Amino acid sequence: MKSLDAALVIKLALQIKQWGQELGFQQVGITDTDLSEAEAHLQNWLGKDFHGEMDYMQRQGEKRSRPALLLPGTTRIISVRMDYLPEPAAASNDALANPSAAYISRYALGRDYHKLMRNRLQKLADKIQAEVGDFGYRAFVDSAPVLEKALAENAGLGWIGKHSNLINRKAGSWFFLGEIFTDLDLPVDTATSNHCGSCSACLAICPTQAIVAPYQVDARRCVSYLTIELHGSIPDALRPLIGNRIYGCDDCQIVCPWNRYARLTGEKDFNPRHRLDSQQLLEVFSWDETAFLTKTEGSAIRRIGHQRWLRNIAVALGNAPYSARIVEALTAKLSHSSDLVKEHIQWALVQQLARSCCM
């Protein structure tokens, strides 16, 4: 631990929060490393196999819930949030209600947030270093085993809601999180109390009923897991429930009453690129791998690759109302697709042709 004069650390904590806001973070909080309650919750969640194929949730053992094991010497965590909402909720609802539209989780419409936030966190660390000299630190943005929501909750940035996302009373939940682990002996902030009350809107709206109980999400049923994390086949029983969501899902956030306080992002990099907020299913299904890589350059979407992209869209096309154009597009791609994509195209064709018989 790097010790500083008591008056200096109080001043430094205030400066860190001011610098953070100047760098584009909407809020900065500070907490210690005690995650014992979150660790128990994590172990219970893993014990129920709710993590599915996300083996990385287990691989690092206690490093995830014990920051000093991840970065020796860590005594404090500076937690930050950055708003990313690119459009009003009504626009997202309109896209979800249009079965021919390709719905992409709103966090992924713009440039990938990881690099942007890491750069800002580094600038914040540089400012701290210029003030106090060399100190131990490391910045994280989804780049290591970190319980970022639990840390943010302890740092006073919000509370973890029944859908497992962090909610801020004045800003909703449409924001990214990042951290600086440090050995500076900074004063800590007070955790925020929970304000979900008796509301169960997120449980009711979840299209696959993945929120199996308040504060308990079975990732194996979650649309975000199915369309992003899952590498193989999407279970047959869950395919019709995915609707037109081809990358992630925002339903639980859209319905959350606290998001009436959410503000549109001021970061230009988070604004939609390549019309990803208004693309049609048939259009994105027509992208070959080159087009996919070009139109998702700098985007978080790239991580799933072209094959899972086509897999997801095939399911969404299968869920759409019958269309001869859809059947034609599915059939045309069938012969030169991978086994993974082919399986989902065949399923989609069965759904489409079944609807044609009922017309």
Image (tube, rainbow, N blue to C red):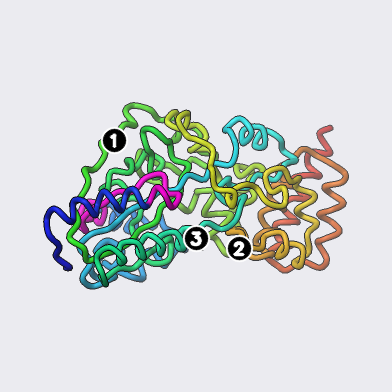
Mark sitting earlier along the chain (3/1):
3
- Using a 10 Å C-alpha cutoff, classify the residue at mark 2 as few (fewer than 14 neighbours), some (14 to 19) or many (20 or more): some
**Residue 226: image x %, image y %?**
55, 54
Q: Can residue 182 be seen here?
A: yes
Q: Give the magenta part as a residue range.
A: 20-39
Residue lying at 60% horizontally and 63% vertically, measured from the top left: 304
Q: Which mark is residue 194?
A: 1
**Residue 173: image x %, image y %?**
44, 40
Instruction: Note whether 275 is above or below 199 in the view shown.
Output: below
What amino acid is labelled 2 in the image?
A: Ile
- Using a 10 Å C-alpha cutoff, classify the residue at mark 3 as few (fewer than 14 neighbours), some (14 to 19) or many (20 or more): some
- Name the residue beneath numbered marker 3: 114
Q: Can residue 145 be seen here?
A: no
| Residue 144 sits in quarter | bottom left
What amino acid is labelled 1 in the image?
A: Asn
Mark sitting earlier along the chain (3/2):
3
Quadrant of image for the C terminus: top right
Nearest the viewer among 144 and 231 is: 144
- Name the residue beneath numbered marker 2: 304
Asked if the magenta segment contains residue 30, the reply would be yes
Mark sitting earlier along the chain (2/1):
1
Side (left or right) of 6 relative to 55: left
Instruction: Note whether 222 is above or below 70 in the view shown.
Output: above
**Residue 51: image x %, image y %?**
42, 58
Nearest the viewer among 155 and 132 is: 132
Asked if the magenta segment contains residue 309, the reply would be no
Which callout, 3 or 2, points to the residue nearer the camera? 3
Give me the C-alpha separation between circle 2 and circle 1.
Answer: 34 Å
Q: State the residue lying farthest toward the front.
A: 131
What amino acid is labelled 3 in the image?
A: His
Side (left or right) of 6 relative to 353: left
- Using a 10 Å C-alpha cutoff, classify the residue at mark 1 as few (fewer than 14 neighbours), some (14 to 19) or many (20 or more): some
